[in-house]
Image (cartoon, helix red, strand yellow):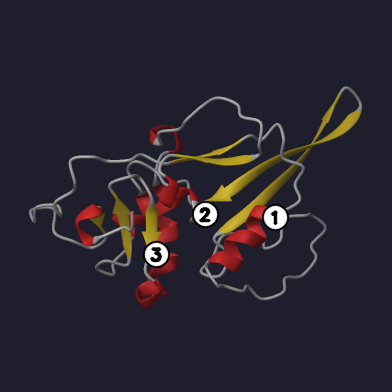
Amino acid sequence: MAMETQDIIKRSATNPITPAPRARDYKAEVAKLIDVSSCVGCKACQVACSEWNDIRDDVGHCVGVYDNPADLNAKSWTVMRFSETEQNGKLEWLIRKDGCMHCAEPGCLKACPSAGAIIQYANGIVDSSRKTASAAATALRGVRLTSRASIKRITGSINAPCAWIGSASARSRPA
């Protein structure tokens, strides 16, 4: 099932008085689950995101940590974060994926000044238009302003580090 205009439930930089686009009665929900207990920090998800979205960041500079690039930007939509901590005399890495979390109430969508640059589909996927991607820096600031506690999350464990739950069409498109 292809996404259509009527599947869009929110658009950036639109008047809240304007009625939302009509959505279908049946709404297949999609969730992206990442089992961090299986993550080894290989950054394959970071590379896959860049390849899928056809974006290439500039080669960074080594600053003594494994975070490269140092932060999210218009050319790096997924970044693996590494934190070193010492527990019981042993050095441990805490690894987390930073990037689009397909929030129920996306801060980037609210902050983006370009009409229609960021959209949220009825199934929960948050997507951006390449034509209006120049507003990415403003949208990323909106993500930082969103309270992390207000983001709806799915908890649980699965066998694979990353899995898609939902419709088959959604599974064919990674975020």
Find disc 3 in the rendering and name its residue: 138
Count all numbered tags in the image, as a single digit: 3
At a point 48% along the width and 51% down the height, the residue shown is: 100
- The residue sitting at the right extreme is 89
- Give the residue type that dot 1 points to: Ala
Q: Quadrant of residue 114?
A: bottom left
Q: 83 or 19: nearer the eye?
A: 19
Residue hosting label 2: 174
The mark that comes first in sequence, 2 or 1, is 1
Q: Position of residue 26 (x, y in %)?
A: 23, 40
Query: Is residue 44 placed above or below 37 in the rendered structure?
Result: below
Kind of residue indicated by mark 2: Pro
SS state under label 3: helix
Answer above or below: position of 128 versus 17.
below
Which of pointers 3 and 2 indicates the residue nearer the eye?
A: 2
Q: Classify 10 Å Cα crowding around label 2: few (below 14), some (14-19), many (20 and above).
A: some
Residue 168 % position (x, y) = 44, 46
